[in-house]
Image: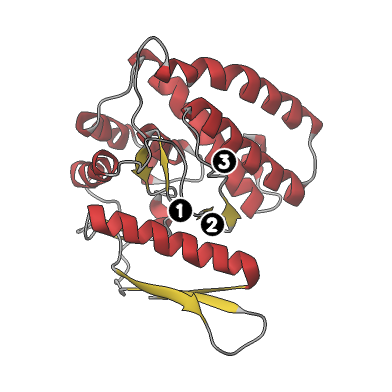
């Protein structure tokens, strides 16, 4: 399978996906198509870049929950940050929008910057919405420090786990072997991966059986009673990212 994109942003996308898929494949072989390489075409204008991986026949039916969530949880357990921090060594993308991935010791700080980055990109595409800006300030300055700060407070430790970064039905290639593509990875709180399952534009991953099955494989972080609130917060990033990638989409209002 070959993917192509042009100019500097195309380079960012192809390098980011190659790096993501290479790391995922080394930890959980078969969860993503085997990566072969990335590079720049010798001829052509504008500069065009490619990412080459193994070809897989598509099957977009719903995967068996236990098998699927076990494989995702396996990636999260095995994917350990090289410096015990949240972030990534190269810029990755969710769709065509780049992530803010500068290294941070605090997950609350990292997520706040990640969300701010997505909000900025959404505003550039859809225009400034004053009410959204006000609400975003309240979330970044109030909700995130309280809700995510608790994960690393009172002696608690939070492992930065490698996540796929865009794990939903639209990136599912095959269901028997559970194969995902279009990775935009970074080291995050593992529960971040599940935020996209809550989004209204999803299909079968919104079913509670997938959430419950995942939590049987990877227990919710403490405070456990705040898991649902964290999942709702994490879904904001994915909804705003979708809005920024699809101008005029109603996800911006939800």
In front: 110, or 229? 110
Q: CA distance from mark 3 to mark 2?
A: 12 Å
Q: Are marks 2 and 1 in contact (CB under 8 Å)?
A: yes
Horizontal and vertical percent for residue 190? 36, 35
Check contact, mark 3 vs mark 1: CB within 8 A.
no
| Nearest to viewer (mark 3 / mark 1) | 1
Nearer to us in this view, 106 or 125 = 106
> Mark 3 highlights which residue?
239
The residue at 38%/49% (across/down) is: 164
Image position, residue 157 (x, y; %) = 34, 21
Q: Nearer the viewer, residue 86 or 178?
A: 86
Residue with the most extreme bottom position: 43
- Asked where in the image residue 212 lies, by quadrant, the reply is top left
Q: Which residue is mark 2?
A: 95
Single out the mark in the foreground, 3 or 2: 2
Residue at position x 74%, y 44% in the image: 123
Q: Residue at x 22, y 43 (%)?
A: 74
Q: Is residue 243 left or right of residue 20?
A: right
Label 2: which secondary element: loop
Q: Quadrant of residue 128?
A: top right
* Foreground: disc 2 or disc 1: 1
Tag count: 3
Q: CA distance from mark 3 to mark 1?
A: 16 Å
Estimate how packed mark 2 is, as few (under 14), some (14 to 19) or many (20 or more) residues with alpha carbons within 10 Å: some
């Amino acid at each position: 399978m070959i993917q192509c994109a042009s100019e500097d942003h195309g380079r960012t996308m192809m390098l980011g996906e190659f790096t993501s898929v290479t790391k995922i494949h080394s930890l959980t072989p078969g969860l993503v198509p085997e990566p072969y390489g990335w590079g720049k075409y010798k001829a052509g204008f504008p500069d065009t870049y490619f990412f080459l991986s193994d070809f897989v026949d598509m099957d977009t039916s719903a995967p068996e929950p236990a098998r699927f969530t076990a494989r995702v949880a396996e990636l999260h357990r095995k994917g350990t940050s090289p410096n015990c921090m949240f972030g990534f060594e190269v810029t990755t993308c969710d769709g065509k929008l780049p992530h803010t991935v500068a290294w941070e010791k605090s997950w609350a700080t990292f997520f706040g910057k990640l969300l701010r980055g997505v909000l900025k990109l959404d505003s550039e595409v859809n225009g400034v919405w004053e009410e959204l800006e006000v609400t975003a300030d309240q979330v970044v300055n109030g909700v995130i420090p309280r809700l995510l700060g608790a994960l690393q407070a009172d002696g608690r430790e939070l492992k930065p786990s490698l996540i796929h970064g865009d794990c939903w039905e639209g990136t599912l290639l095959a269901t028997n072997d559970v194969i995902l593509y279009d990775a935009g990875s970074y080291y995050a709180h593992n529960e971040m991966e599940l935020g996209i399952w809550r989004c209204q534009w999803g299909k079968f991953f919104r079913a509670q059986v997938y959430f419950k099955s995942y939590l049987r494989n990877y227990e919710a972080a403490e405070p456990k009673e705040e898991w649902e609130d964290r999942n709702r917060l994490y879904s904001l990033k994915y909804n705003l990212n979708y809005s920024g990638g699809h101008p005029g989409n109603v996800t911006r209002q939800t």
